[in-house]
Image (spheres, helix red, strand yellow):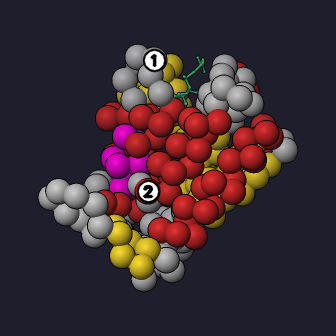
Amino acid sequence: MDGLAPVRVLRIGHRPGRDERTTTHVGLTARALGADGVVLAGSAADRAETIASVTDRFGGPFAVETTDDPLAYIADADEAVVHLTMYGLPIQDRLPQLRDRHRSDGDSSDGGQSLLVVVGASKVPFEVYERADWNLAVTNQPHSEIAALAVFLDRLYRGEELDREWVDADRAVVPRATGKRVEDR
Ligand SMILES: C[S@@+](CC[C@H](N)C(=O)[O-])C[C@H]1O[C@@H](n2cnc3c(N)ncnc32)[C@H](O)[C@@H]1O
């Protein structure tokens, strides 16, 4: 988001066939709720075009990257690594501290800590838990990477992402109480 240190989301463990829709929705949720980009690993890269085409039509900025080696990607990350997992520490206890570091007490994007947010699909290798700077749980109950990511981003940005401006959109939805209206830009 504008004025804040970058946040990227890395999707790992994608299973071809089974996870196509979920992986696409991880990317679309990351984009809609203020992340700066998504990194798709291995065969999840097939979803890159779908996510990029939404950005082309409805605006950005939002980067879609791919990697063949997500574990090396995480190991080498310059960002603080946030792993969303039901086994982690409660997000509500840890997020104030993480948010302060990300915002660097309200300084510009140069000052804050960039984040790489990792979400899984199938079983996440233990080395991710060990490498992560933050293993955070959105409740300690099993649910979904899409839901966990949405709650995390909304809490990180304190809801400010809902008012974000979109750049280079071909079209935009005009909010209406009933019906649907989309305008060309
Ligand atoms: C369907 S879960 C499968 C997790 C898998 N059983 C494991 O042991 O890692 C897929 C992803 O959803 C996310 N997730 C599910 N429940 C979560 C929770 N309560 N808090 C945070 N993330 C969660 C995690 O990123 C997880 O890797």
Farthest residue, direction bottom: 185
Magenta part of the chain:
151-157
What is the quadrant of residue 157 in the picture? bottom left
Q: Residue 123's spot in the image, x, y percent? A: 66, 19
**Element carrying mark 2:** helix
Disc 1 to disc 2: CB gap under 8 Å: no
Q: Quadrant of the image for the C terminus?
A: bottom left
Q: Marks 1 and 2: which is nearer the front?
A: 2
Q: Quadrant of residue 122?
A: top right
| Nearer-N-terminus badge (1/2) | 2
Q: Amino acid at mark 1?
A: Pro
* Mark 1 CB near ligand 1 (8 Å cut): yes
Q: Which residue is mark 2?
A: 32
Could you tell me which secondary element the residue under label 1 belongs to? loop
Q: Which residue is mark 1?
A: 142
> Which secondary structure class fits the magenta region best?
helix
| Magenta stretch holds residue 38 | no
Q: Is residue 31 left or right of residue 183?
A: right
In this picture, residue 34 sits left or right of residue 127: left
